[in-house]
């Protein structure tokens, strides 16, 4: 009996061992199946994620050391030539159905900064209305929203840089465009509210919000030889006034000269200093036998709140504390880009201007008692460039900016045209 019991125990052990062995043989297949399912899931997620970006490295030569410049920023006091990483963008876009999210960094020798952090959601019924919230391009000015990787000139026009520094702001916008089958698809409407303080500060410094709206048309002819667009934009906002002294009118004073007239009403303190812009932009691209011709232009006018030393929008992250100057202005640009036949070469001519104070000119500025300063000087720039697209990734650019300023016999710094022309040699890699 003892022997029989032993045999039974041995048989049971062998059975359990064989069953276990069979399970262990089956487990690798189950593990492989699980791994494949996970891999498929990961690939599905990766298909929704797009990584893109570009790097712009450049060398610049200025006429004079230490010039103030809109060609990539001011030159240091003792510097008239420099190497620079102008932009180093890395962009992550995740799209899932009718929603998407974007994070974009700018990586240069100046550090790492966020450029875009926003999400967009489109309604599911007609896919016509979208909501965008976060930090993104302000929907004013075609050139402000046009990617620097595609632009034919190194930098945006002076007025665009001055009024929309950094291009982006924190806010929310609604966009409406009819579905593609509709004949109204050529129209697009946008409207949004923004902090109005740009990207220099992560927090708003006042309770005022800026409204931006636009309506535009974009169309391609049936033969796809011509693309054209036209858009009207409106900006209405303001910033907190740092004290009660506001200069918004220019009149002939008792001395017979044009001068700023101060309003020192006590209620001016902490009230809103007006910023109001009207803009129109137009684009035309024509595929001709001589090569693709692109012609774009933009005109902006309105009133800008600034200081005695600057007519630019605030970009410091802190509220202004000095006197407020509200100037009537005009500005804009025209750019012509011509591809040379079917080659990889392109020639560019661009003219831009910015008059920060349309009520005065030349020798009105700088007179004793007028409070008119170099901030009221008008600038114009004509640029000539050559672009060579070696392939879809690499682009070479050579561009020369000829900058002309208004002169005044009453301002020694502007008694003659400043020597502030800039040559830019740039290499771009896009991926």
Image: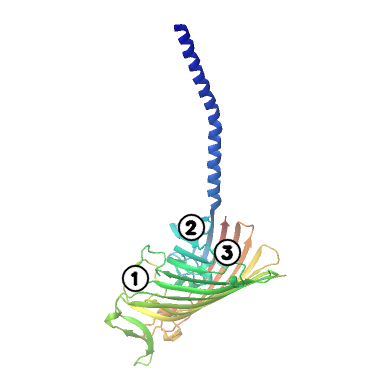
Earlier along the polypeptide chain: callout 2 or callout 3?
Answer: 2
Query: In which quadrant of the rendered view does residue 305 lie?
Result: bottom left
Is 247 displayed left or right of 11 in the figure?
left
What's the residue at 48%, 13% (across, down)? 8
Q: CA distance from mark 3 to mark 1?
A: 36 Å
| Mark 3 and mark 1 residues within 8 Å of each other at the beta carbon | no
94 and 285: which one is in front? 94
Name which residue lies at 35% across and 91% down.
253
Secondary structure at badge 1 equals: loop
Q: Position of residue 50 (x, y in %)?
A: 54, 54
Q: Quadrant of the C terminus?
A: bottom right
Question: Circle 3 — which element?
Answer: loop
Residue 419 in view of the camera:
no
Q: Which mark is residue 69?
A: none
The residue tagged with tag 2: helix, strand or loop? strand
Q: Which mark is residue 101?
A: 2
> Are dots 2 and 3 in contact, CB under 8 Å?
no
Q: Residue furthest right?
A: 289
Does label 3 or label 1 sit earlier along the sequence?
3
Residue 258 location in percent, x, y?
Answer: 39, 88
Alpha-carbon span between mark 2 and mark 3:
22 Å
Q: Label 1 belongs to which residue?
A: 207
Which label's residue is closer to the chain start, 1 or 2? 2
Q: Residue at x 56, y 51 (%)?
A: 47
Farthest front residue? 1
**Callout 1 environment at 10 Å: few (<14), some (14 to 19), or many (20+)?**
few
Q: Nearer the viewer, residue 351 or 1?
A: 1
Q: Does residue 14 appear in this view?
A: yes
Q: How far is the residue under mark 1 from the one under mark 2? A: 27 Å
Question: With 110 as the anchor, is 51 left or right in this view?
Answer: right
- The residue carrying mark 3 is 150
């Amino acid at each position: 009996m003892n022997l029989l019991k032993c045999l039974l125990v041995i048989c049971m052990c062998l059975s359990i061992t064989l069953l276990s062995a069979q399970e262990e043989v089956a487990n690798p297949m189950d593990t492989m199946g699980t791994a494949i399912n996970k891999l498929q899931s990961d690939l599905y997620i990766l298909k929704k994620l797009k990584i893109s970006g570009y790097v712009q490295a450049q060398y610049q030569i200025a006429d004079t050391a230490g010039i103030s410049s809109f060609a990539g920023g001011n030159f240091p006091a003792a510097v008239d030539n420099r190497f620079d990483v102008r932009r180093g963008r890395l962009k992550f876009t995740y799209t899932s159905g009718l929603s998407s999210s974007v994070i974009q960094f700018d990586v240069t020798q100046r550090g790492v900064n966020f450029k875009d952090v926003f999400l967009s959601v489109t309604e599911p019924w007609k896919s016509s209305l979208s909501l965008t919230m976060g930090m993104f391009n302000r929907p004013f000015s075609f050139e402000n929203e046009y990617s620097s990787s595609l632009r034919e000139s190194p930098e945006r026009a002076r007025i665009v840089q001055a009024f929309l520094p950094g291009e982006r702001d924190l806010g929310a916008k609604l966009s409406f465009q009819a579905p593609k089958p509709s004949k109204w698809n050529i129209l697009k409407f946008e409207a949004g509210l923004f902090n109005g303080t740009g990207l220099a500060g992560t927090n708003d410094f006042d309770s005022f919000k800026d409204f931006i709206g636009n309506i535009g048309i974009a169309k391609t002819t049936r033969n796809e030889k011509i693309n054209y667009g036209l858009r009207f934009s409106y900006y209405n906002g303001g910033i907190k006034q740092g004290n009660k002294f506001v200069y918004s009118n220019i009149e002939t004073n008792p001395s017979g000269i044009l001068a700023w007239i101060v309003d020192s009403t006590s209620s001016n303190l902490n009230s809103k200093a007006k910023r109001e812009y009207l803009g129109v932009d137009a684009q035309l691209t024509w595929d001709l036998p001589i090569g693709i011709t692109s012609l774009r232009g933009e005109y902006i006018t309105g009133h800008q709140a600034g200081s005695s030393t600057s007519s630019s929008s605030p970009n410091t992250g802190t509220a202004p504390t000095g006197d407020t100057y509200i100037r009537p202005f005009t500005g804009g640009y025209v750019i012509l880009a011509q591809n040379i036949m079917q080659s990889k070469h392109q020639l560019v001519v661009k003219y831009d201007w910015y008059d920060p104070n349309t009520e005065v000119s030349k020798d009105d500025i700088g007179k004793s008692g007028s409070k008119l300063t170099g901030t009221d000087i008008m600038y114009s720039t004509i640029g000539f460039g050559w672009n060579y697209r070696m392939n879809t990734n690499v682009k070479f650019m050579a561009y020369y900016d000829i900058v002309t300023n208004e002169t005044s016999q009453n301002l020694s710094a502007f008694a003659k045209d400043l020597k502030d022309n800039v040559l830019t040699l740039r290499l771009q890699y896009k991926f």
